[in-house]
Image: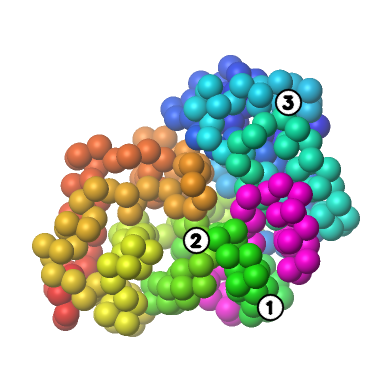
Amino acid sequence: MIRLSAGTAACLGLSSTRMDAFPTTAYLLSGRKCLMKCSFCPQGTGSNEALNRLGRVNWPEYSWPDVEKSLRGAREKGIERVCLQSVRHGDGIESLLGIIARLKNITDLPLSLSAWIADEEEASTLLEAGVERISLSLDVINPLIFEQVKGGPQHSRLALLLRCAEAMPGKISTHLICGLGETEAEALSLIDRLLKADVTVALFAFVPLKGTALENKKPPPVSSYRRIQAGYYLLRDGAAEVSSFNFLNGRLRSFGLRESDLRARLSGGSAFQTSGCPSCNRPFYNERPGGIIYNYHRQLEMPERETALDELLFSLGNGSRGF
């Protein structure tokens, strides 16, 4: 048995669930209960939530024969990538290697993996087995909060992430969750460091989930998330340097660009779409349909682009060095 996100199951025809949007990546989840104790995650050891959730998404379980059959026709249904996500197992990467081999026999779609990796050797072994990209999730940006939320020192996981990125260029990703108590200056400084190390960054907004230790914590203000998204986009495109950003008490006040330049750079709306691996759109992973959209799973329509950009510029206010 293997778990699929509810959207993936509906897209592949395994479920009749009505969806507001379909994913462009097929998301699979391996494992029943994670050995980690991440305070934000329903899969964590300390969670009281049902095990069928990750983020806001339900993950029903299906038989391998049904999944294999549906994945063979996935490309015709708009799927462009497969993403295997895994809780931390007690058997290291052995079970992952078996699943990867099975998936490679089913489809030639590029395969991403998000899993707990012990060292560079394990990462290399997984790439050799057929994984195109590996995500070693940091999740928490501030080192002290990392210890409280995930347990253990952040520096060791960050060091492994950077070593893997150096040894396997263009193959390593990470996840960062905004809204756990970090400042915008901390978020953008870490993003800048990771981008310069050739790490692909996927941004998430914190989602309080019932049954987790952080179920009563509020999600981040959308204005703060927009500033981080815009900063990430400008840094990734080489349109700005973090040294030109102006912060006040950790809050971004200016990108060091003229308003006309900023509008030109961000007018397409791409900065506010889902970030991460190619073809990963994660519909409503952070959002409720009809509510605030943190990560747009598609291209923004003109009114949405204008609203997001106007909100961003308004939130910056009169920055001391322009917008």
Foreground of the two, 321 or 205: 321
- Circle 3 — which element? helix
Name the residue that disc number 3 marks.
Answer: 68
Q: Are marks 3 and 1 in contact (CB under 8 Å)?
A: no
Task: Give how far across and how far down residue 320 sits, in percent.
Answer: 16, 81
Q: Earlier in the sequence, mark 1 or mark 2?
A: 1
Q: Estimate how packed mark 1 is, as few (under 14), some (14 to 19) or many (20 or more) residues with alpha carbons within 10 Å.
A: few
Residue 38 picture quarter: bottom right
| Residue 20 shows up from this direction | yes
- Circle 1 — which element? helix
User: Would you say 52 lies left or right of 65 here?
Assistant: left
Task: Give how far across and how far down residue 316 sits, in percent.
Answer: 21, 68
For the residue marked with disc 1, what is the amino acid? Ser
Q: Earlier in the sequence, mark 3 or mark 1?
A: 3
Q: Are marks 1 and 2 in contact (CB under 8 Å)?
A: no
For the residue marked with disc 3, what is the amino acid? Glu
Q: Relative to 301, is 252 above or below? A: below
Q: Earlier in the sequence, mark 3 or mark 2?
A: 3
User: Would you say 319 lies left or right of 173 here?
Assistant: left
Residue at (20, 51) in percent of width and height: 267
| Residue 146 shows up from this direction | no
Distance from disc 3 to disc 2, alpha carbons, whole Å, reads: 30 Å
Residue at (58, 78) in percent of width and height: 143
Task: Give how far across and how far down residue 194 sits, in percent.
Answer: 50, 71
Residue 164 picture quarter: bottom right
- 133 within the magenta span: yes
Name the residue that disc number 2 marks.
Answer: 201
Instruction: Please report the bounds of the magenta region as a residue range.
Output: 116-145
Q: Which mark is residue 156?
A: 1
Foreground of the two, 229 or 113: 113
